[in-house]
Image: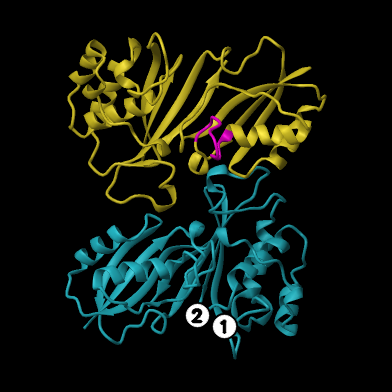
Chain colours: A cyan, B yellow
Amino acid sequence: MERIKIHFAYDGTDFAGYQVQLEKRTVQLVIEQALAKIHRQDIKVFTSGRTDSGVHAIDQVIHFNTPLTLDCSAWRNALQTLLPIDIQIKHVEKVDESFHARKSAKEKIYRYQIINQREYDLFKRMYEWHVIKPINIDQVKIAAKRIEGTHDFTAFSASKSNVKGDKTRTIHAIDVLEEFGRIVIEVRGDGFLTHMVRIIVGTLVEIGIGRRDQSCIDRAFATLDRQVVGLTAPSHGLYLWKVVY
Amino acid sequence: MERIKIHFAYDGTDFAGYQVQLEKRTVQLVIEQALAKIHRQDIKVFTSGRTDSGVHAIDQVIHFNTPLTLDCSAWRNALQTLLPIDIQIKHVEKVDESFHARKSAKEKIYRYQIINQREYDLFKRMYEWHVIKPINIDQVKIAAKRIEGTHDFTAFSASKSNVKGDKTRTIHAIDVLEEFGRIVIEVRGDGFLTHMVRIIVGTLVEIGIGRRDQSCIDRAFATLDRQVVGLTAPSHGLYLWKVVY
C-alpha cells in the first residue's frame, strides 16, 4: 500500500461544501467517485478539514491509501481527467504512513476577500463579499490584534456548532491587507470552530463600519456569548488558503 | 410616453443567450419580466443586438417606451431590485424618439479574453478561453490586420447563420493586447454575423499556434468557404464591450 497526498483547489460555488451529504454535490463525493473509478472499489479519503457550502479552496489537502503503484504525474492526470472542472489538482506526492492530512497539520491559513464600494463587481459576486458602507481599515487592524492569541472562541462559533469539548484555539495572526482595490483578511491558526473565520470577519467588518465597538471582543472572550459579536460573513468570500505541515 | 435607454452588464454563464427562447432563462426574458412587474403590462424591449449563450456583456444597451414618469435613478433602483444579481444596471437615460438601440448604433466593440498557459485559472474558467499551446502574438497581430476592412464575411459566419442577404461588413480595427497575463483581442465593427467574432478569434488563435497559415484569410474572403478558417472560439471568453452611438 502507498499513501498519496493531494493538494488541490476548488471553486465552492456549485458545491454543498466539502463533506458528503445525502443527495448533495460535495467535494468529497466527487473525489471519492473519481477514486472509485480508478480503483474499481471504494477508497477512504482523509481531509485536512471540511469547508462550508460556497467556501473556496486554493490549497486543500487530502490523503488516501492505495494498492495501486502509479507515479505522481499519472495520479495527477487520472484524477484531473475524472474530476469536474471546478476542482483543480495542484500537486501529488507520495508520503509515508506517519502523514495524516488532518492530524499532521500544524497551521491553517484562511483568506477572506471583501470589496468595499457602492457597486458590486458582477464577475466576482461569488468570490468576494460586497460591503457598501465604508470600512475604516485602521479600526479593523486594531480589532484584529485583539483577536490574535489563545482564547476560548465559543462566542465566535456557530451556536449549533458540532465541535464538542474544549473551544480554546490559538490564532497566530490576523493580517489585514489591501490588494487590487480589495480588503483581504488573512487568518492563521492552529484550528478553527464551525463558522469561526466567518464570524471573526463579520465582527471585524461591523467594527470597521462603526456598528460595533472594539470592546465587544474582550466581552466576547469573557462572556462566550455569540450575541456580542458580529454576523457570520457570507461563505463566498472565504478561501482555505494553505494547510501548513 | 417616454423612451428609456438602459446600459447594463451581465454574466452570460447562467443565461441561454440574450434572446427569448421557449423555457430557457435568457437576458431578454428576465428584463421583460422585471418591466412587466413595474408596468403591470408587457413592454416591448429593443436591444442593440443579441448575444449567444455564455457570452458576457460589459455595456449592453436596450430601449423601451413607457407610460410611466419615473426619474432615472428610480428606474435604476426599480430594475436592479427586480433583476437577478447576474445582470447589473450601469446607467439609465431618457432619450428622444429618434433613438433606437439597434438602428442608431454606429459601432460595436467586442473583447475576447484568452489565457495562454499550461494550467487553466480555476476562478476564471467561465470568463476566458484556456489555450495551452503557445500563441505567437506577432503572427496574431499580422493576421488581425488582414481581417480589418470591408469584406464579405460569409466564411467567418456560422453556416446555419440566420442572417439573410448581404454578408458584407466592415471591421474598423482588431487590436491584440496583452493585459494582466492574458491575451485580449478587441474587435470593432459596424455589424457582425452570427458567431463572426468567435470565428475570427478561433482563426487568429489557429494562426498563432501554427495550425493555419496567414494565407487562409485571403482565401476565406475569396472562396467564402467556412472550412478555410478556424474553429468557433468558445462563447465564455467573449464580451460585448461597448455599443457606440
Q: Is residue A48 visible?
A: yes
Q: Mark number for residue A190? A: 2
Q: Position of residue B23 (x, y in %)?
A: 55, 39
State whether discs 1 and 2 lie on one chain.
Answer: yes
Q: Earlier in the sequence, mark 1 or mark 2?
A: 1
Circle 1 residue: A169
Q: Mark number for residue B173? A: none
B181 left or right of A155 in image = left
What is the magenta range? B17-27
Cα separation, mark 1 vs mark 2, equals: 7 Å
Q: Position of residue B60 (x, y in %)?
A: 56, 28
Query: In this orientation, which residue lies closer to the viewer: A188 or A26?
Result: A26
Q: Within 10 Å of the Cα at label 1, are there few (<14), some (14-19), or many (20+) other Cα atoms?
A: some
Query: In this orientation, which residue lies closer to the viewer: B48 or A4?
Result: B48
Residue at 39%, 15% (x, y): give it: B171
B201 left or right of A215 in image = left
Farthest residue toward the right? B69
Predominant SS along the magenta part = loop
- Residue B26 included in the magenta stretch of the image: yes
Q: Amino acid at mark 1?
A: Arg
Identify whether B29 is placed above or below A145: above
| SS under mark 1 | strand
